[in-house]
Image: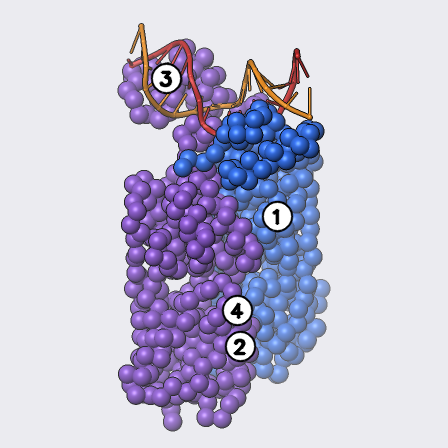
Chain colours: A purple, B blue, C red, D orange
DNA sequence: CTGTTAGCGCATTCAC
DNA sequence: GTGAATGCGCTAACAG
C-alpha cells in the first residue's frame, strides 16, 4: 500500500541502494545487466523516488517560486503562462504565490528569501523593497524580476517609454493632434511603473511633434476594466474632446470602446483608440495596439533564472525586450 | 552563510534539538523559561525550519497540486484565483500544472497520483480517465474535481443544465423565439462538458415553450474568442437570423458583440445577447449573463480537499453550486 | 563496477 | 519537562 522505497527495490533486485540510486540518476557507470535488472524491479514495483527525500539529500528544492500581483489582469496571467510553459519542460516545480495585497507581497518576499524554500524566484511586476533585495543577496537566492527593475537583480523588461512613444507617434502620423492618455493611477501602492513610462513616451512624442501637452487629456483611475469605462466617459463628454486616445493597456482600450459605444461615438470614425500589451482581446476586438512579448518574457525570465541557479554570478542581467506596433481597426486619420 | 539548523539553535540555547522542535511545534509542554530562551535564539539566528526536512520527517508534502487546462480562459483563471486565495491562508503550497495538451494532462495525472508528490490534488475542468481515477484511489491521493465530475471523486460543479435553461428562459420571456446557441465544439479532446449541459438546458427551455429547435441556430467552433467572432458572423449573415443569441460563455458573448458591430447590427435593439460565467468582462461590457460562482468554487474545492486530507473518507462529496441570472444591457424584447 | 555508511534537517518515541 | 536515539528516503563519498 505504502509506496515502494529505494530499499525495497534494492532488496528485490539483490543489489545495494547505492546501485539503485546510480541507475536512477544514470550518473555513474553500472553494468548493463545490473541496470536492466534494477529497471525491471522498478517497473515491477511501480517505484518512483520520493521527491522530498531527494531534495533533502541533494540540498535543492527543485522548485521555483513565482510571485504574481494579480491573477485578474490578462497581461500578468500571460506572463505567468510563459513562465509555466518554460518551467514545465524543466525539472522544476512552479509554486505560485499571488500577492494581491501589500501584506501578502511582504509575506512572500520574506518567505521566499530563504534558500531552503525554493531554488529561485521569479517576481512578476513587483518591486522589492531594498530590505528584500538585501535578503535575497544575503541568502544568495537567485531571483529575476519580470516587468520590474532593480540594479542588483536580474530583470526582464520592455522599453515602455519607447512603446508609449511608438503609440503616440502612430496617432500623430495619422494626423491627430488632440491625443489623450488614459491609464491607471501613475502612483500606486504596488509601484507599478509601466504606465508612467508609457506616459513619458507619450509626452515625448507630443513634444517632438510640437503638440502642446494638455493636462485635461490625461486621466487616471483605479486599476481595472470597469474604472476604465468610467474615466473614458468622463473624458469623452468634455467639450473639445480628443480625437484619439492612447489607452495605457488593452484593458483600458476595451473600456474606451465600451464608453464610446454608450456615448454613440463611433470608433474609429469619430475616435481613434490604441491600446498597449497585445493581449488576446485586442486581437479579437481588432484594436490597434503596441504589442509586447508577454508570454516570451516569461520564458526568458525562466531561462535567465535557471542559468543563474546553475552558474551563480554576481552581475545581474538586464534584458530589454522589444515592443511592436500592430495597426488594426481602431485607428484612422481624424475625420475633422 | 548557510542557514541555521535546528541543531545550531539547540546548541546556542543549551538545550536538545528535541526541545527546540517542541517549541517550534508547540505541541508538547515546555517550561516557560526554556521556551523563551529557545525563542530568543531562534530570533537571534533568524532561524526557520527547513520545509524539506520537515516534510520528509512528517511524511507530508504540505503541497497541493493544481492541474488546470488553460491559463488562457478567464473562467479557468478565476477558479484558480479562488483556489489560490484559499490555499494562501492554509499551510499548503500551491504547485501549478498547466495541462494544455492531452499529453501534459496524461503526464500530470500520472505524476500527481503519487502520494509523495503532494498531499492532495485539485483538478480544474478536466476529466480523468478511469485509469487515473483508479490510480488516485490506489495511492489514496485525495483529489477533487472542480467543474468536472466522476462518481468516485469529490467534485464541485454548477448545474449547467439549469443555467442554460435559465438563460434561454430569460430570452423567451422577453418574447424571443428565434434564439440561437453558440458554443465551442460540444465534442472536444479535453472532454469539457459544460457547453453540452448548457445546450441541454437551452433545448429543454425551447421545448417547454413549444419553440421548435432549429439546427441552423446552433453553431459551434474552436475554443476561444477569435473563433467566436467568426462563427457569430456566420450565423448573423444568414437570412432569417436569430433575434437573440445565447452565447455559451461570456467570451463567446464578447465575440458576438464584436461580430454584430462589424455587421452593423445593433445590440440590444436588433439583437439580444446573453452570455454565461459572469467573468469581469461581462460586467465591464454590460452583458447580460448567467453567473456562476467561479472564484467561490475554487475556495470550496480547497475546503473540500483539505477536509479530505485531514479526515480521509471513502464517500466522495458532490457539491452543486447555484447559477444566477444577471440581467444587464444586452437583452431586451425583440424589436420585430 | 558495487556495497557500506554517513549524513541532509527535523519529528518523535522512549527513557530519565 | 527534557535529552538521546532512531528513522523519514535518498545521495554521495569512501572502500573494496
Q: Position of residue B159 (x, y in %)?
A: 67, 54
Say which element carries label 4.
Answer: loop
Mark 3 Cα-neighbour bin, 10 Å: few <14, some 14–19, many ≥20: many
Image quadrant holding the C terminus of chain B, namely: bottom right
Q: Which residue is at the front of the view, A238 or A286?
A: A238
Say which element carries label 3.
Answer: helix
Residue at 29% x, 15% y: name it: A31
Q: Which numbered marker is on residue B89?
A: 1
Say which element carries label 2.
Answer: helix
Quadrant of the image occupied by residue A2: top right
Number of the front mark, 1 or 2: 1
- The residue marked by circle 3 belongs to what chain? A
Q: Position of residue A170 (x, y in %)?
A: 31, 79
Q: Is residue B204 above or below residue B147?
A: below
In three-dimensional space, the C-alpha distance between marks 2 and 4, rounded to whole angstroms, equals 9 Å
Instruction: Locate residue B292 relative to residue A231 in the image: left or right.
Output: right
Q: Position of residue B113 (x, y in %)?
A: 52, 34
Which tag, 2 or 4, sits closer to the chain's start? 4
Q: Mark 2 highlights which residue? A: A229
Is residue A91 visible from the viewing direction of this image? yes
Mark 1 Cα-neighbour bin, 10 Å: few <14, some 14–19, many ≥20: few
Quadrant of the image occupied by residue A247: bottom left
Q: Are marks 1 and 4 on the same chain?
A: no
Instruction: Locate residue B145 relative to residue B318 in the image: left or right.
Output: left
Image quadrant holding the N terminus of chain B, namely: top left
Q: Position of residue C12 (x, y in %)?
A: 63, 23
In three-dimensional space, the C-alpha distance between marks 1 and 4, rounded to whole angstroms, equals 25 Å
Q: Mark 4 highlights which residue? A: A224
Mark 2 Cα-neighbour bin, 10 Å: few <14, some 14–19, many ≥20: many
Residue at 59% x, 70% y: name it: B283
Q: Mark 3 highlights which residue? A: A19
Amino acid at each position: 500500500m505504502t509506496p515502494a522505497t529505494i530499499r525495497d527495490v534494492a532488496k528485490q533486485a539483490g543489489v545495494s541502494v547505492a546501485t539503485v540510486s546510480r541507475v536512477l540518476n544514470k550518473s555513474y557507470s553500472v553494468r548493463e545487466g545490473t541496470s536492466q535488472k534494477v529497471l525491471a524491479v522498478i517497473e515491477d514495483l511501480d517505484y518512483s523516488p520520493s521527491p522530498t527525500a531527494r531534495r533533502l539529500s541533494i540540498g535543492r528544492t527543485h522548485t521555483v517560486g513565482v510571485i504574481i500581483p494579480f491573477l485578474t489582469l490578462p497581461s500578468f496571467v500571460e506572463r505567468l503562462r510563459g513562465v509555466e510553459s518554460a518551467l514545465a519542460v524543466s525539472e522544476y516545480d512552479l509554486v505560485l504565490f499571488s500577492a494581491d495585497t501589500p501584506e501578502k507581497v511582504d509575506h512572500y518576499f520574506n518567505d521566499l528569501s530563504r534558500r531552503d524554500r525554493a531554488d529561485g524566484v521569479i517576481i512578476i511586476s513587483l518591486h522589492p523593497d531594498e530590505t528584500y533585495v538585501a535578503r535575497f543577496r544575503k541568502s544568495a537566492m537567485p531571483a529575476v524580476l519580470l516587468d520590474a527593475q532593480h540594479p542588483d537583480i536580474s530583470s526582464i523588461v520592455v522599453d515602455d517609454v519607447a512603446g508609449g512613444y511608438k503609440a503616440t507617434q502612430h496617432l500623430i502620423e495619422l494626423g491627430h493632434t488632440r491625443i489623450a492618455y488614459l491609464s491607471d493611477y501613475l502612483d500606486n501602492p504596488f509601484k507599478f511603473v509601466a504606465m508612467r513610462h508609457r506616459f513619458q513616451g507619450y509626452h515625448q512624442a507630443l513634444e517632438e511633434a510640437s503638440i502642446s501637452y494638455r493636462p485635461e487629456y490625461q486621466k487616471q483611475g483605479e486599476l481595472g476594466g470597469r474604472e476604465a469605462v468610467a474615466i473614458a466617459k468622463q473624458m469623452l463628454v468634455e467639450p473639445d474632446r480628443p480625437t484619439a486616445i492612447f489607452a495605457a493597456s488593452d484593458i483600458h482600450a476595451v473600456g474606451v470602446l465600451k464608453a464610446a459605444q454608450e456615448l454613440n461615438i463611433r470608433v474609429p470614425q469619430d475616435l481613434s483608440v490604441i491600446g498597449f500589451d497585445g493581449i488576446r482581446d485586442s486581437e479579437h476586438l481588432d484594436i490597434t495596439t503596441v504589442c509586447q512579448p508577454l508570454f516570451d518574457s516569461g520564458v526568458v525570465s525562466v531561462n535567465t533564472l535557471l542559468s543563474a541557479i546553475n552558474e551563480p554570478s554576481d552581475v545581474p542581467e538586464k534584458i530589454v525586450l522589444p515592443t511592436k506596433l500592430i495597426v488594426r481597426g481602431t485607428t484612422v486619420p481624424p475625420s475633422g
